[in-house]
Amino acid sequence: MKIIFCGLKYEYGVPSRGLSFEYYNFYDTLMKMNNGEHSVVHFPFDVYYRELGQKGMNQKLLEYVRNHQPDLIFFFLFNDEFQKDVLLYIKNELKITTFNWFADDHWRFYNFSRYWAPFFSFVSTTDAESIPRYHKYGIYNVVQTQWGFNHFLYQIPSDFDFEKVIYRFDVSFVGQNHSNRERIVKFLRSNGIDVACFGRGWASGRLEFNEMLKVFRNSKINLNFSRASGGFKPRSLASILVTRRCDRKIRLQPISRLPQNIKATIHRFGKQIKGRMFEIPGSGGFLITEKAGNISDYFIEDKEIVVFDSPKELLEKIRYYLGNDSLRKEIAYNGFRRAVSEHTYEHRFNNIFKQIGLKK
């Protein structure tokens, strides 16, 4: 199948932050999955947007379509960079199947996803509770899926032994410092738990990709938090009135969007399943994750991963598993086997392609 992947090349469209999540996980998987059976071309819309502006970027997409004649255009929207008439032209006039993966539907559904879904042949959501919301607005071209991990990149070394691993950290967290994360980390540290934190907003800063994988494998316990970025803070509250496209320029939101933006901001502080829930077990790490959504649909609690619902419960479970090496290693191994056998992006994409009629 010939695929054009339309996704950010750089994280949040900022070259200095390195390659994006979409590039590492979606584009790389699409190229390599099923023994490389697909012909995949990347359309880095953030790069073209900065170079050509919105209209020029959209015309560049049509040029890609003419040159590559794809069977599928796989989008991962960031904001409203694409023009709706261009999307409709590709879908209705050129008869090319288009698909968009929506992220953060637990809050972005209200002011983003439901307005863009009708312009694609199919869309997906990782938020099970959003399915009836789509249906409420007459949108039925939606597929339920979930985050996963790119097993072509998130690999354990061939000589890795779960029983003989040498640990560098007791407890670690890799991710941005936002929402309630710093407060929980301070609580743990005040109770004698040494938590090593990496990512934007932490003193240690970001890790290179391969270093991050080493932290996952060489930590006795890896933490994952489930709240979305923002919450009721000045930056997220400002999004009620302003927005940013991938060129990072601030633009005023239309007044007509105000009610939807307020609703989205209210829901922004909720919990959601994150990609880390699959990346850490898939890399051989032991995971304690904050409760969110339908986690039990993907892993068996206390057998493949461990779940907490409050800082106090997290503290208790950290102390327990730091003192139970054999059980902790057994759970890490079980989680790894489950992730590799069911939760790679190759699994996700093959399932989606079947549901939208592109794969038998």
Image: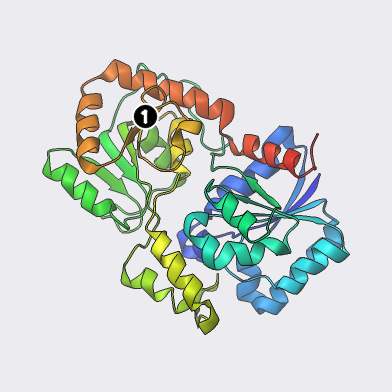
Residue drawn 77% across and 37% down?
A: 37
State the count of labels.
1
Q: Quadrant of the N terminus?
A: top right
Residue drawn 20% across and 22% down?
A: 323
From what the image shows, is residue 76 above or below residue 344?
below
Residue drawn 51% across and 29% down?
A: 339
| Residue type beneath disc 1 | Phe
Taking 119 as reference, is 273 left or right?
left
Q: Is residue 254 visible?
A: no
Please say which color scheme the image uses: rainbow
From what the image shows, is residue 358 above or below residue 326?
below
Dot 1 surroundings within 10 Å: few (below 14), some, or many (20 or more)?
A: many
Percent of width and height locating residue 117: 66, 61
Res 90 → quadrant: bottom right
Taking 321 as reference, is 237 left or right?
right
Q: Quadrant of the C terminus?
A: top right
Q: Secondary structure at mark 1?
A: loop
Percent of width and height locating residue 206: 37, 52
Q: Is residue 10 visible?
A: yes
- Judging by the rendered image, the residue that carries numbered circle 1 is 286
Percent of width and height locating residue 122: 72, 53
Percent of width and height locating residue 188: 18, 42
In depth, the one of 189 and 196 nearer the eye is 189
Taking 332 as reference, is 140 left or right?
right
In depth, the one of 52 and 327 nearer the eye is 327
Name the outermost residue toward the front. Answer: 136
